[in-house]
Image: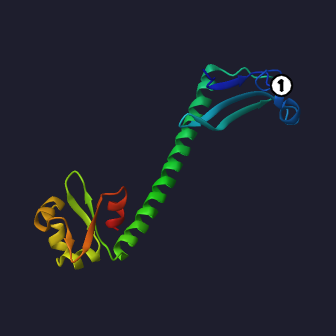
Amino acid sequence: PQERAIAAHEAQTDPRTREFTESYLEPLEITSMLDATIRVDGKVVGVVCLEHMGEPRHWSQDEIVFAGQVADQMGNVFAYSRRCETEAQLEQTAALLKVAIEQSTSAMVVYDAPSSRIRFANPATFDMLGITRDILLSATLNEHCRHWGLFHADGKTLFVLEDLPHFRAIEEQ
């Protein structure tokens, strides 16, 4: 198993850190290092580095644990940031999809599969079916299918889409 942290009490001679002696440790007069990896989804994305100058420092177990906890918190921050970016991209994609559906000349309905509730219908749907938004949204998709059969009218087809992630949030804006 990989070490959670590297506690190099004498960093310039420690086999795990001595390669940095000439280029980093000596010029900055660093004698001791404590490094803890920052991980997101099991992958190393950074390192928390604590460095000491002067007499070599023996890092206590509490300091080693603390460095690991700081690294874990940084990993949580990075993961949250990635999640926020992904959600923003999904919302943007859903907004673009909604505009495309609204402007389509093909009739389209978005519905919630478990409840069969219609969440959204584009203007072409109302034109094709000859009903109002209130009537369409007042019944489930299953009820409408029984009433209109296969959803074909005048040679046009109604496209039915299962509810999409983030579509509901965009719909409510």
**Side (left or right) of 15 relative to 40:** right
**Side (left or right) of 127 relative to 49:** left
Looking at the image, the residue that sits furthest to the left is: 147
Please name whichever residue, 41 or 7, is drawn nearer the observer in this view of the structure. Answer: 41
Q: Quarter of the image containing the N terminus?
A: top right
Q: Quarter of the image containing the C terminus?
A: bottom left
Decide: is 149 above or below 2: below
For the point 14% across and 65% down, the residue is 149
Decide: is 71 above or below 87: above
Q: Where residue 72 appears, x then y in whole percent? A: 55, 35
Please say which color scheme the image uses: rainbow
Q: Where residue 160 appears, x then y in whole percent? A: 27, 63
For the point 46% across and 63% down, the residue is 92
**Side (left or right) of 56 relative to 22:** left
Name the residue carrying label 1. Answer: 12
Q: Where residue 29 appears, x then y in whole percent? A: 85, 32
Q: Name the residue type under label 1.
A: Gln
For the point 26% across and 70% down, the residue is 157
**Side (left or right) of 62 relative to 135:** right
Q: Where residue 83 appears, x then y in whole percent? A: 48, 49
Classify mark 1: helix, strand or loop.
loop
For the point 41% across and 63% down, the residue is 94
Mark 1 Cα shell of 10 Å, populated few (<14), some (14-19), many (≥20)? many
Decide: is 62 above or below 128: above
Which quarter of the picture shows residue 33?
top right
Decide: is 91 above or below 38: below
Which quarter of the picture shows residue 24?
top right
